């Protein structure tokens, strides 16, 4: 028993050891299998336009044996072009097709394999690419995400974990003619938001005249036509993009070499874009995610800035949701932490030339119940309109039943004897009774007794530039704080802000100061009344004021109603109106049901009374029938005796007609009330 137990312990220990070794080996293999890298050499360099240079693609397998490589390079086609995709030796033994490249899309792809057992290198050359420089600027050559290095493990495991590209500075060739400078665009590799370009130059030696031209080709040689002896020129309204100034000088009829100078102009802000808030703009989530992205055609994007401004009035203190700075640099997505309330989100996209595209949006953080109730205003209006239509329909339905009930009630008060169908029969019965018998009156009298028992600035200075408004509450609501911001050309000055109600003429004046950069921003500490407004600003330094800026219009939507010091939002009013309409609809349905039910019961009761009257009338007609037949029998006997006169014959004819009427009334049945008035 002891030996068996000891044997089991030894087996268990061996299994544990084997398992541990396996885990170690697998872990080591995983670590090794994630260490391959691709890189370019040289990683940095400066090259002139028109020059060609080589970039080599190297592989580090990280002490692994690999058997296949796919390397895709991306480069800017406007600045570089591939002359030849491969030169020299390579560790690739089998190329899967020739290297593919496109100078239009800016890509080049190498695909190759190495026979078993593969290759294990730390600096293995895959290929060498020869590029030609097309234009000035900064060029980044990098590996795309589709690049792969496959492990020789029978499964083709991709072990590429790191890639390093190359950053290249592309410049113009050294000047061979006059030395060129530009006061407006002093740095040839920098982008400027200035489209008026000034060039000046100094000749290397005596010069009789100069020939120059500005175009989009980097190595143009100007023509042999003199432009004069001046040593400066200004080009106005230069289009966006990279332009080149070329100049050469002439001395004693001999033209010298040409110098080139690059200017980069970008006056266009980044493309328009939208803010996307997840889960949505009106939410109960206090950490919403804000997404934003755009592009820039010429200089490229530099960075984004964001400002989240609380639109709630917190006792005159305005909360800056993302700190005390006006704007903070950020990237997308941006995740703020917000308290309950309304916020304005302002995002600025800057390009490299410092052009700015600004967009804004709203976020409203509510409780879960408030978020569920806070639907778009037009949905509220459609809901209220639908409820009003239903209310009118139900009101008409209730009115019909109320009117019917009133008719039935009035008919019951009047008694069945006053109903049209009964009155017609009684009138006819009375007329016939007067002719033939007195007994009908007694019957009718007894029946009737029974029925009755049941019934701005004068000190403005044109030399002082006006401030520029860059952001403001373009479509604010009456429960949102008003704000406006911009920049002033003169730093450390004050800005007078004017807001005027277009309808009433009421004007508000506010004041704020610029910072050291000339930027200014004002947030009002109370809500503006609803209405249409005009906004303009003036700069002020001492007693001097600038001319008023351009006027901007904005609307303050009536989203609240003020009762004294209490402000009720339109959403709350919409909810109350909807609830009241629903209550009115239910009340009218109850009223309609009440009148319908009691009208039906009273109609049935009235019908019973009318049937009773009808039976009594039939008795009267039956009595009258006997009287008429008795008279006819007398006339018949007179005819047999031959003593009848002409007058009796005429009476016989009339009595025969009346007898038919009486028989008809005796057979007639009343099944419904056709007219109740």
Image (cartoon, helix red, strand yellow):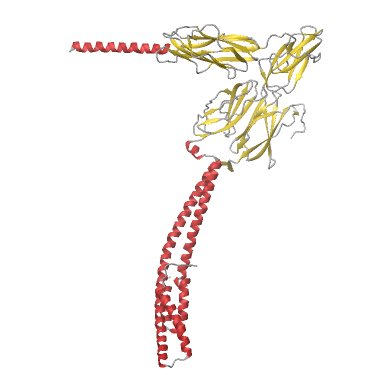
Question: Farthest residue toward the front?
Answer: 97
* Residue for point 47% across, 74% down: 423
Query: Is 136 above or below relative to 557?
Result: above
Q: Nearer the viewer, residue 15 or 174?
A: 174
Query: Is 671 above or below relative to 467?
Result: below
Query: Is 11 above or below relative to 609?
Result: above
* Residue for point 47% across, 77% down: 427
Residue 209 shows in this picture: yes
The answer to whether residue 149 is left or right of residue 53 is: left
- Residue 172's image quarter? top right
Tell me residue 117's x, y (percent). Answer: 41, 8
* Residue for point 44% across, 71% down: 416
Tell me residue 168's x, y (percent). Answer: 60, 12
Tell me residue 17's x, y (percent). Answer: 31, 11
Quarter of the picture holding the N terminus: top left
Tell me residue 79's x, y (percent). Answer: 62, 16
């Amino acid at each position: 028993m002891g030996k068996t137990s000891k044997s089991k312990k030894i087996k268990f220990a061996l299994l544990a050891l084997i398992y541990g070794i396996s885990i170690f080996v697998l872990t080591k293999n995983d670590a090794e299998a994630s260490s391959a890298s691709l890189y370019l050499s040289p990683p940095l360099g400066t090259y002139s336009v028109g020059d060609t240079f080589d970039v080599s693609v190297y592989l580090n397998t990280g002490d692994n044996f690999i058997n296949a490589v796919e390397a895709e390079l991306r480069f800017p086609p406007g600045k570089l072009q591939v002359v030849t995709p491969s030169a020299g030796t390579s560790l690739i033994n089998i190329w899967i097709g020739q290297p593919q490249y496109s100078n239009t899309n800016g890509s080049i792809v190498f695909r190759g394999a190495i026979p078993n057992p593969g290759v294990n290198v730390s600096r293995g050359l895959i290929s060498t690419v020869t590029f030609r420089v097309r234009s000035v600027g900064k060029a980044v050559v990098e590996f795309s995400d589709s690049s792969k290095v496959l492990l020789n493990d029978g499964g083709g495991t991709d072990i590429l974990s790191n890639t390093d590209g190359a950053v290249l500075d592309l410049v113009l060739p050294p000047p061979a003619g006059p030395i060129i400078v530009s006061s407006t665009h002093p740095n040839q590799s920098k982008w400027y938001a200035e489209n008026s370009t000034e060039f000046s130059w100094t000749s290397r030696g005596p010069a009789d005249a100069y020939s120059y031209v500005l175009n989009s080709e980097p190595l143009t040689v100007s023509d042999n036509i003199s432009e004069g002896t001046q040593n400066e020129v200004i080009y106005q309204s230069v289009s966006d993009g990279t332009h080149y100034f070329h100049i050469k000088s002439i001395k004693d009829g001999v033209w010298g070499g040409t110098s080139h100078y690059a200017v980069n102009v970008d006056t266009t802000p980044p493309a328009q874009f939208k803010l996307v808030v997840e889960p949505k703009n009106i939410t109960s989530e206090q950490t919403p995610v804000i997404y934003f992205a755009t592009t820039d055609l010429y200089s490229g994007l530099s960075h984004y800035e964001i400002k989240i401004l609380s639109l709630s009035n917190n006792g005159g203190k305005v909360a800056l949701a993302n700190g005390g700075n006006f704007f903070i640099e950020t990237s997308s997505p941006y995740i703020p932490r917000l308290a309950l309330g309304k916020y304005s989100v302002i995002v600025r996209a800057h390009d490299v030339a410092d052009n700015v595209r600004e967009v804004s949006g709203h976020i409203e953080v509510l409780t879960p119940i408030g978020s569920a109730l806070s639907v778009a205003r037009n949905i509220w209006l459609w809901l209220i309109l639908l409820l009003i239509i239903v209310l009118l329909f139900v009101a008409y339905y209730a009115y019909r039943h109320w009117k019917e009930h009133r008719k039935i009630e009035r008919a019951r008060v009047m008694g069945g004897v006053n109903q049209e169908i009964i009155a017609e029969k009684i009138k006819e019965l009375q007329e016939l009774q007067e002719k033939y018998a007195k007994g009908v009156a007694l019957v009718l009298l007894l029946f009737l007794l029974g029925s009755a028992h049941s019934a701005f600035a004068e000190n403005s200075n044109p030399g002082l530039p006006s401030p520029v408004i860059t952001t403001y509450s373009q479509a604010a609501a009456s429960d949102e704080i008003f704000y406006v911001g911009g920049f002033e050309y003169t730093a450390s000055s004050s800005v007078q802000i004017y807001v005027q109600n277009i309808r009433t003429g009421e004007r508000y004046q506010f004041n704020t100061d610029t910072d050291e950069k000339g930027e200014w921003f004002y947030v009002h500490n109370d809500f503006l009344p609803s209405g249409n407004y005009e906004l303009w600003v003036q700069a002020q330094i001492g007693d001097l004021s600038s001319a008023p800026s351009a006027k901007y219009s904005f609307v303050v939507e009536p989203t609240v109603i003020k009762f004294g010091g209490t402000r009720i939002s339109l959403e709350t009013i919409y909810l109350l109106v909807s609830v009241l309409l629903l209550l009115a609809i239910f009340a009218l349905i109850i009223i309609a049901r009440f009148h319908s039910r009691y009208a039906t019961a009273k109609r049935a009761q009235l019908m019973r009374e009318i049937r009773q009257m009808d039976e009594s009338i039939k008795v009267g007609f039956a009595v009258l029938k006997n009287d008429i037949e008795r008279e006819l029998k007398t006339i018949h006997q007179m005819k047999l005796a031959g003593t009848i006169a002409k007058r009796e014959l005429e009476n016989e004819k009339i009595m025969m007609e009346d007898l038919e009427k009486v028989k008809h009334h005796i057979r007639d049945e009343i099944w419904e009330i056709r007219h109740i008035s």
